[in-house]
Image (cartoon, helix red, strand yellow):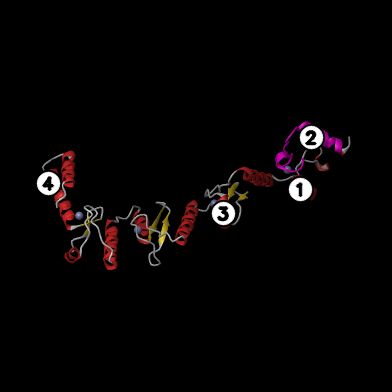
């Protein structure tokens, strides 16, 4: 039997889309059909495995095979879907620098950042670093578009003096104060005071700029006389801007509710008192 005949016989025996006798990759993966080498007669081999046999006289080691299969699987997958990093899940399509690669050592497809990290430190890169990096890029984009970046906790705007950070535990962009607080205490910073401080600054700025202030409750406009008598202020746990009338009413309602609670009224009755006060604004 000639070599050509032996090859045909082996192909007939293996059927369509036969695996390579060395690396196991299927014929359809390649542009050309598997061939045979005289050192491994009767075995169909892919081009890469033929080359290996020619160069070294032996087939691939198990390690080399795994790498070939991993790389090929990545290439095949890339034809039909977006490749995610096996460590940090960043999609290949979001990376404008380099494609993800197959890291044979761990048998995973990794983004460049995770792969380099692994090679450098011999361990997995913390996936939250990727989230952090993306959040950071997102913030950069927002800044370029002129959208102010605010702390998700206390609403403080980002300024060169008050840089914001991505807090990986809460997945929120936080100002330095809120970020540090969370890292230190493991819980959200109580920010009502901070919000009040900001509202007060806002009020001051508006007055300076001659922008009228409105009562958040009755919509009354602040007059020059009101400013002199400090009739408008930021009050309550929800830090609303209220005129003196609405402020007093708020306090009266609060004390009424408190008294009612002392008398042993139930929540429903207290709510009714509050609602009644809202319906009858003091004029
Ligand atoms: Zn092969
Ligand atoms: Zn990654
Ligand atoms: Zn904050
Ligand atoms: Zn009012």
In the image, is residue 43 above or below residue 91?
Answer: above
**N-term mark: 4 or 1:** 1
Front position among marks 2 and 4: 4
Mark 2, residue position? 11
Q: Is residue 25 shown in magenta?
A: yes
- Image mark for residue 95: 3
- Image mark for residue 259: 4
CA separation in Å, label 1 and label 3: 33 Å
Q: Along the horizontal axis of the image, is 93 left or right of 5?
A: left
**N-term mark: 2 or 1:** 2
* Front residue of this view, candidates 248 and 156: 248
CA separation in Å, label 2 and label 3: 42 Å
* Region in magenta: 4-33
Q: Farthest residue in the right direction?
A: 1
CA separation in Å, label 2 and label 4: 94 Å
Residue drawn 10% across and 42% down?
263
Front position among marks 2 and 3: 3
Mark 1, residue position? 52
Secondary structure beneath label 2: helix
CA separation in Å, label 4 and label 1: 90 Å
Secondary structure beneath label 1: helix
Q: Within 8 Å of ligand 1, the CB of disc 1?
A: yes
Q: Quadrant of the N terminus?
A: top right
Crowding at label 2, few (<14), some or many (≥20) Cα neighbours within 10 Å?
A: many
Crowding at label 4, few (<14), some or many (≥20) Cα neighbours within 10 Å?
A: few
Q: Within 8 Å of ligand 4, the CB of disc 4?
A: no
Residue drawn 18% across and 42% down?
271
**N-term mark: 2 or 3:** 2
* Front residue of this view, candidates 268 and 15: 268
Front position among marks 2 and 1: 2
């Amino acid at each position: 039997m000639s070599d050509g005949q032996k090859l045909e016989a082996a192909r007939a025996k293996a059927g369509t889309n036969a695996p390579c006798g060395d690396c196991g990759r299927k014929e359809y993966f390649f542009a050309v059909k598997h061939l045979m080498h005289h050192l491994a007669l009767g075995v169909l081999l892919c081009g890469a495995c033929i080359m290996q046999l020619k160069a070294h006289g032996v087939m691939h080691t198990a390690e080399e095979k795994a790498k070939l299969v991993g790389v090929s699987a990545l290439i095949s997958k890339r034809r039909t879907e977006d490749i995610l990093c096996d460590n940090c899940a960043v999609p290949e399509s979001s990376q404008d620098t380099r494609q993800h690669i197959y890291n044979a050592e761990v048998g995973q497809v990794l983004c460049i950042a995770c792969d380099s990290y692994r090679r450098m430190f011999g361990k997995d890169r913390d996936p939250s670093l990727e989230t952090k990096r993306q959040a950071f890029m997102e913030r950069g984009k927002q800044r370029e578009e002129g959208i102010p970046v605010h702390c998700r906790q206390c609403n403080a705007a980002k300024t060169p003096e008050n840089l914001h950070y991505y807090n990986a535990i809460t997945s929120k962009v936080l100002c330095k104060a809120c970020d540090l607080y969370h890292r230190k205490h493991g819980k959200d910073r109580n920010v009502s005071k901070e919000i009040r401080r900001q509202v007060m600054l806002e009020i001051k700025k508006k007055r300076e700029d001659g922008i009228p202030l409105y009562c958040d409750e009755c919509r009354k406009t602040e007059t020059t006389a009101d400013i002199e008598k400090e009739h408008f202020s930021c009050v309550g746990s929800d830090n609303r801007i209220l005129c003196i009338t609405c402020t007093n009413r708020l306090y009266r309602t609060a004390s009424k509710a408190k008294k009612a609670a002392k008398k042993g009224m139930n929540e429903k009755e207290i709510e009714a008192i509050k609602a009644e006060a809202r319906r009858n604004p003091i004029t």
